[in-house]
Amino acid sequence: MPLSRRHFLARSAAIGCSAAASPLLSPVSFAAAPWDSRLVVIILRGGLDALDMLQPYGDVNYAGLRPTLAGGPDNGGLDLDGFYALHRGLAPLMPLWKQQDLGFVQAVSTPYRNRRSHFDGQDLLEAGTSGLGQGGDGWLNRMLQNMGGVENRTAFAIGQGEMKLLHGAARVSDWSPDAALTLSPQAKLLAEQMMQNDPLFHGALAEALELSQDGSMMLGLPASDGRMEDMTMPVPTRGKSHLKVAEFAAEMLRGDTRVAAFSINGWDTHANQAKGLGTAFRRLSDTILALRGGVGDAIWGKTAILAMTEFGRTVRENGSRGTDHGTGGAMLLAGGAIRGGRVHGRWPGLAEVDLFDRRDLMPTADVRSQAAWILRGLIGVDRAQLEQVVFPGLDMGDDPGLLW
Amino acid sequence: MFSPVLAEIRFGCGLSPDLQPKGSVEDILHRLAGPDHMAIAHPTADFDSFWPQSTALKALRQKRGLAEGTDAYDDLNAQYKAMRREARFEHTRWFGQIILRHSQTEDGFRERLALFWGDHFTAQGKSGLAKRMGAPYVDAAIRPYVSGRFADLLISAVTHPLMLHYLDQHKSIGPNSRVAEKSSGQKGLNENLAREVMELHTLGVGGPYTQRDVRQLAELFTGLGFKPKTGFQFKPNMAEPGPETVLGTEYGGDPAQLEAIHMVLADLALHPATAQHVARKLVVHFVSDRPDPVLVGHVAARFRDTDGDLAQVYAALLEHPAAWRPELRNVKPPLDFIASACRALALRPAHLNRMAPKRLAKGLLLPMVLMGQPWERSNGPDGWPEEDAAWITPQGLAARMRWAMLAPRQLAGRLPPPEKFVETSLGGYADGPVRFAARAAETQAEAIGLVLSSPAFQRR
């Protein structure tokens, strides 16, 4: 069962910020975290095409703009609601849609709306600010800074890539499923001494050793007493890396972890989009299903997965059966806490006058306000904090109703 | 100011027990102006002769597909698998050559520049054998141009088949071209390469261009293509007719010609925003994530004054006192970390060349995945991050330390005495705790591993 917001707010009003230390909280579910719901943020790097994930086949202009890429039920898409069809690469998620555990928000974007650079687009998406260069931390970290009782393991950035949305003053863990470091006691001591005057190295070492001590972080590797012979060369264990990440995330979320963030790449589709997106959607579906299976029913009920991308793509197909960088994109939402089985957001239309810059899907909402409402409902973050600190300068507007 | 040891560490491939550090900036620049000894001594493959094999593999796969269910299948399948395995082994061998170049060179700045420009002009194959052809691309399109005019380097990289393939340029068709007119269905532009040329290769993401400039450049670029068998080819039938205006200047006309594309690239190469963008990137890469604006300004000015003569641009970087602050700041990315460790361990070419491909992959290539830098597989055309914090994560550092403790024995055979190794690998940068660690570790492998794990070794 999802934790209701009212329930949470009543409780946090009673105990203030020191939720984790409060005797009012039972050790069962509130052992190390100040709230009980789970949030997973997946950054889809490369600019996912909103119009191919969520095919607006009911729009009269759609098919004409996409000579080879048009979807819809006649072209293999899975009908959702008579207007939108789902890309067939996401077919494995249809059961979730039917259970109302899968939803979407169409036509959203960050305030990044004119230059179309992936790298700046991602930086802004993760910073959560209204413009570039307005501070070095990410919105998810600022949310954690604002919450009481946050500890190292409350939030995890998973994988080898950087997750800027978790950068900042709040303590978070950075880890990858097969990264364990086992050192002999002597080597550990010597390494710590060597690095103690270099904060970057010292911090990373301390966290690596701490996380490696915890058997659960080692994903199937045998426990070690730190002898040299126990150490193995750093080669990736077999298996698909996105699944390893999802399984690791699920394992952490079953415990004290409340927030997990990682990325899935491969959404830049300038050419042969059909092939490229098929592969990427398969990875995304597998990831969500692995999370679903990994956390189990009870936790799934209070989980929200938020998959977001830096921008959308051009409405018109280009000359190489692909699409170029555009503006309005879509969010995918999953989890028992999500009000799924529907496409949220306001559809702007595809007539030329309705497009952004006459080429892109017009954003009808700020992606940050959607994320903010989820933080508000799922975790109980205060609205003023969201508008002033987490997403500085944001007007959240009305509740889009993304959660039950 | 200049110090030979710092020069090897910051601008070269690190210290080697076998090779003397260079005595002066002039010496470094002089060697860079001379022949590329390492490319000759430790070759990869000639791109143009390797490229057709990609087509051959594809043809074999198709033939195998048609033979499914017949007696011929097993034989074709074996051939196909052998060809793929051979390509995988070759790829691993090329990485070994790159490690050997770093280990053996007296011209380390050249190796660093090859990595720097290879990353600036990231191009990756997307399917089949093309996926493995990054090293021959860098050797053909980048290395010969690293100390010439930036314009020539730009033209070489941007018109190379692997770049055209990576950024889909060869599929971009002028909407009014002859090819478009003759065929039914939608034929049009792909603006991927045009955008990255402006954003990444020349003006920089904040540069003075608009979406309209990107679009016009994409139209001007139509016709850039290649043939699978013979390499680069300009295809006028695919080119958009008529002139295009990029940053206020008109290029091309009828008939479309390659010269107009060379002209726009040469102009973009000389733009003041390009000078600034390239200067900043060089300073960030070689000196610090937070570049000294005075140093950037100095390098950018030389770029402008010499019309992008890269040898002069490097001279400006190397002559400036701000480039020689003794404190080590930047973190070596995984490739540079591994390569400089192999150099410090005096890896023998014969030993490495004798190693089985699988062992070489396990010792060198696969560890890079957990260090966060799978070779030739960056996330996008912007290449690898420069920020130190992107590399020294708990998981990245753990992978480096595991490698440092276990790989040297496999790669180098005999390990050097740790107390000597700490001197030959760190020079004056060996501080008390590192010296102590080299002495106090319980095993020789741990001692060597700890020295390589020290911030002094991992920074430059």
Image (tube, coloured by chain):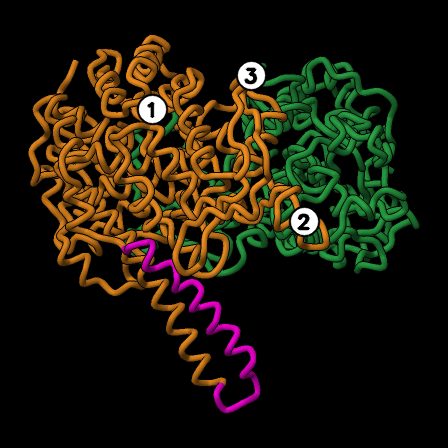
What is the crowding at mark 1: few (fewer than 14 residues within 10 Å), some, or many (at least 20)?
A: many
In this view, the residue in front, A64 or A374, is: A64
- Which residue in the structure is indicated by mark 3? A133
Depth check, mark 3 against mark 2: the one in front is: 2
Which residue lies under the disc numbered 1? B282
**Residue to which mark 2 is pinned:** B181
Magenta residues, dominant SS class: helix
Disc with the residue nearer the chain's start (1 vs 2): 2
Percent position of residue B87, x then y: 36, 64
Q: Are marks 1 and 3 on the same chain?
A: no
**Residue B203 shows up from this direction:** yes
Residue extent of the magenta highlight: B45-72
Residue at the (34%, 55%) spot, across then down: B48
Q: Percent from the top left, x then y, of residue A185?
A: 30, 42
Tell me whether marks 3 and 2 sit on the same chain.
Answer: no
Amino acid type at circle 2 is Glu
CA–CA distance between discs 3 and 2?
46 Å
Callout 1: chain: B
Q: Helix or strand or loop: what does disc 1 sit on? A: helix
